[in-house]
Image (cartoon, rainbow, N blue to C red):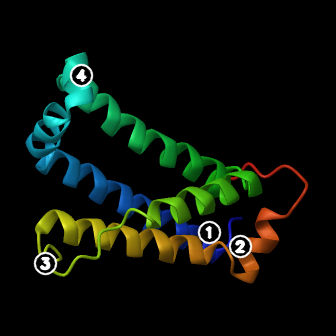
């Protein structure tokens, strides 16, 4: 049976991904305009499929990591998520002038949810469960 910390990791992390998806749908036109305004990308002629692909990959990678952490007890996936999140923190915009923009607020909420979820992976019950060497597959 999976420990409470892993269950809460799963809930918070998946909630953050749902918010990312909702934000991506709401901000899709702005994202597409941003892609088209980049001269390097404009030369390649990216369209809707490129934008959808970027969004899909940005959701697929965390979903794969979630699966291997929450369902397969992978320590490697845990550390990959920690490294990717730490790298992503370098790009969080804390500019007070744009802080109350709905997209920025959503981004900050997602960041807080993901940091809280990752912090749960370092609790004793989660560390013990993730460090087991036997079969980790849990329904």
Foreground label between 4 and 2: 4
Q: Position of residue 29 (x, y in %)?
A: 8, 40
In this figure, which residue is indicated by the disc labeled 1?
Answer: 6
Foreground label between 1 and 3: 3
Tell me how far mark 1 sits from mark 3, CA to CA.
37 Å
In this figure, which residue is indicated by the disc labeled 2?
Answer: 126
- CB-based contact (under 8 Å), mark 4 and mark 3: no
Q: Position of residue 121 (x, y in %)?
A: 65, 72
- Mark with earlier residue (4, 3): 4
Q: Residue at x 69, y 81 (%)?
A: 123
Q: Residue at x 33, y 35 (%)?
A: 54
Foreground label between 4 and 3: 3
In this figure, which residue is indicated by the disc labeled 4?
Answer: 49
Front residue (pair 4, 102): 102
Residue 28 can be seen in this image:
yes
- CB-based contact (under 8 Å), mark 2 and mark 1: yes
The label shown at residue 127 is none
């Amino acid at each position: 049976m999976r420990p409470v910390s892993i269950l809460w990791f799963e809930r918070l992390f998946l909630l953050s991904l749902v918010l990312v998806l909702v934000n991506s749908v709401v901000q899709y036109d702005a994202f597409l305009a941003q892609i088209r305004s980049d001269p390097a990308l404009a030369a390649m002629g990216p369209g809707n499929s490129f934008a959808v692909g970027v969004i899909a990959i940005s959701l697929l990678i965390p979903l794969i990591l979630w699966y291997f952490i929450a369902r397969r007890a992978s320590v490697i996936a845990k550390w990959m998520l920690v490294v990717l999140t730490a790298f992503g923190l370098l790009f969080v915009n804390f500019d007070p002038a744009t802080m109350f923009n709905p997209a920025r607020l959503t981004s900050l909420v997602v960041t807080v949810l993901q940091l809280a979820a990752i912090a749960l992976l370092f609790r004793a019950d989660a560390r013990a469960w993730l460090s087991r060497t036997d079969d980790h597959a849990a329904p």
